[in-house]
Image: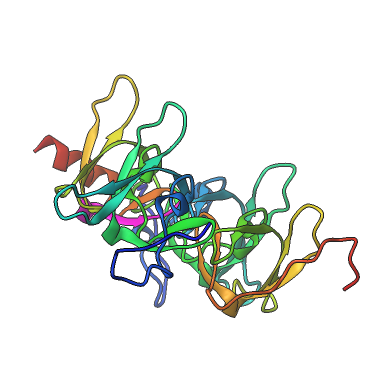
Amino acid sequence: MKDHHRITKKENSLDNTLNLGNSLNVKVISENGFIVGKASQIRIHPTKMCIEGILVSRGIFKKPLYIGVSYIKRLSHESFILKINPSTLLKGKNVVDTNGKILGKVKKIVRKEHANDIKELVVKSLLRKEIIIAISNIKSIGENILLNSNYHAKQKHIWKKS
Amino acid sequence: MQSKSISGKNLNRTITSDDILGKEVIDLDGRFIGVVEKVLIDPIDLDFIGIDVDKGFLKKGLSIGKNYIDRISDAAIFLKIRVVYEIKGMTVFDKIGAKVGVVSDIELLGNRNKIKNIYIRRGVIKKDLTAPAEFIEIIGHNVILSIKKEKLLSYNKS
């Protein structure tokens, strides 16, 4: 590191900080190792002068994600590693019931306001009406979504009255 | 057609091999592993030992012991575990998110579903790296190590 004058009160020395310029366009990795995208912007609070979050670009066809700093585990010049698996990425995953039957794919994720916490999932399959599954009915979320054994809602075909 | 029984037991709650063969196998992660190809039985004890899973064309089959099976439902067999062989082909990142390579092979502890070492391929020219299980922090969509790449490289040199 080039020699420099240091003027700080309580803050760390230069050597104990990261140059955010080097962290732009690094990959953003979710808690389970999935590459979410690239950090296109690092957002700072205008008066507190601290990092508020990062904007993650996911390619030209996908909406970027703005992820708050409370969900970031680690930051380095190589990547941002998140504490979470963004729930918005569940779209398109299969939902499997307790009998092993695929009920459909996740069409929409309803979250608690802007947090990563899921409230319910909207699941859709071909020729069947949408079903709403509350978080309490979900056993696990991984490669696919497994439902609890106590979930027994019947799916109706789209031509039947609700 | 009604059948007679001389088993001395109530067979109403039993299932047959037809109820198992051809069913999808789903692991703890919700991953579809393959389809049950065979049911394995001990020829002396006549106990159900496990299943053979067909993972698809050109893929090696997998034998899973009954202790790893959670339950058998109408359409699938659910496992209690995440099958560690499925990590083959996953990308390996180090502690700070630097890419290390791709999992090329796995060494298990005996025949159990427990990792002893993973082997990481880094390209055609570079030598593969070995990472013991204690260096693995998370296995999810990919693998994240608990150490930096440099430490892994020095571990492999020693």
Evaluate whether residue B80 shows in this view. Answer: no
Whole-percent x, y for residue B98 in the image:
39, 44
The foreground one among B62 and A139 is B62
Quadrant containing the C terminus of chain A is bottom right
Whole-percent x, y for residue A121 in the image:
68, 69
Q: From the viewer's perspective, is A126 left or right of B123?
A: right
* Rendered residue at 28%/70% (across/down): B8
Q: From the viewer's perspective, is B138 left or right of A82?
A: left
Whole-percent x, y for residue B38 in the image:
36, 42
* A158 up-or-down from B44: above or below: below
* Rendered residue at 72%/72% (across/down): A132
* Rendered residue at 55%/71% (across/down): A50
Evaluate whether residue B31 shows in this view. Answer: yes
Q: Which residues are magenta?
A: B133-141
The foreground one among A106 and B126 is A106
Q: Give the image quarter of residue B11.
A: bottom left
